[in-house]
Image (cartoon, rainbow, N blue to C red):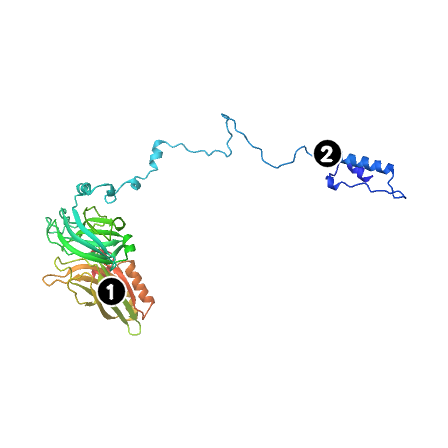
Amino acid sequence: MASRSSDKDGDSVHTASEVPLTPRTNSPDGRRSSSDTSKSTYSLTRRISSLESRRPSSPLIDIKPIEFGVLGAKKEPIQPSVLRRAYTPDDYFRKFEPRLYSLGPGSDDVDSLTDEEILSKYQLGMLHFSTQYDLLHNHLTVRVIEARDLPPPISQDGARQDMAHSNPYVKICLLPDQKNSKQTGVKRKTQKPVFEERYTFEIPFLEAQRRTLLLTVVDFDKFSRHCVIGKVSVPLCEVDLVKGGHWWKALIPSSQNEVELGELLLSLNYLPSAGRLNVDVIRAKQLLQTDVSQGSDPFVKIQLVHGLKLVKTKKTSFLRGTIDPFYNESFSFKVPQEELENASLVFTVFGHNVKSSNDFIGRIVIGQYSSGPSEANHWRRMLNTHRTAVEQWHSLRSRAECDRVSPASLEVT
């Protein structure tokens, strides 16, 4: 029979449920013969025996063998080891960069020092000031009271005349905003000035707590550059602003040795059909103080230079006793379109002086020979937007800086 040959050859394996049974052969009277029954029983027994011999003694489970470590046995590395170069002591220390770990003169950890230790270390003097926040009107009041033990003046360019006395004043700002700063008056020829001046900052209370009060003591000199004596910084989150308080703080060195000259807001507009270059001098802020007693009497001189030739000069009125003047004055220059690419505008801010020559404050050049990227960008924006006024703030530069980068600056006074 086919089933028996399959069992003998062992070519196929059937489960118990798949075992084919021998077909039944019934006798004419409907009963199974004894010979047929014995044959079926014999066949079934052989099949079951064959399946039992082929079935594994335990279930087949596909698992990875578990490795048991023996204490003290040497473990074989799973991954190949990486050959590393053995460093000598010289190679090891050469990888360090000392400049990353050294502290500069203005980066010492002064938080760990007392005011007496700071004063003894730097010998820059002390500053007395107070703060108070007004919740009703939402403003912070900073009172600059006095200073003492300020050091003798230092001349950066050798042009200072009085080397025995300082002319100190204080600049106040809330970091990170240094543009909207305040400034006290100048106290003449003293190392222990008394200021007694109050300044308010319109700022929400929560915002004030995120700011840092920066007080910078500066030495004024009319014939030389103003020099920074020292600074005091106070994170306002560390003080009780509502209760208020006053402190004596020792000055520490500042990385900024010279003060900024101020900023100037200008508007430029060119009309091709009329060949007119229109200039609006809108305002200036935080100008360098040029007068000890009155602050400054600033005005702006505007000079048109074609190529390297001075063509026209105009100037604003001067405003008395301010370092934040508002001008809102307009000027127009005749410049044909074919000459526009060779034109330069020189803006110079002076402090008006009746008794002697006017005091130079700062300068910028806009046009063909711009004095910097900001000035060049303003000129380019104006050329690309004819008939539309283009406003921009500019930081004033020194005369030497402008003369070095702009030939147009050399052609004016």
Q: Name which residue lies at 29% across and 64% down.
A: 379
Marks 1 and 2 in Cβ contact (< 8 Å): no
Q: Position of residue 112 (x, y in %)?
A: 24, 41
Q: Name which residue lies at 33% across and 36% down.
A: 94
Is residue 258 among the parts visible in the rendering?
no
Depth-wise, is mark 1 or mark 2 nearer the camera? 2
Front position in the image: 233 or 340? 233
Residue 261 versus residue 164 in the image, above or below: below
Q: Position of residue 291 (x, y in %)?
A: 13, 58
Q: On the picture, is 100 further left or further right than 196?
A: right
Give the labeled residue for mark 1. 345
Is residue 232 among the parts visible in the rendering?
yes
Give the labeled residue for mark 2. 52
Q: Position of residue 231 (x, y in %)?
A: 21, 49
- Disc 2, SS: helix
Residue type at mark 1: give it: Leu
Residue 325 versus residue 235 in the image, above or below: below
**Quarter of the rendering containing residue 39:** top right
**Quarter of the rendering containing residue 117:** top left
- Disc 1, SS: strand
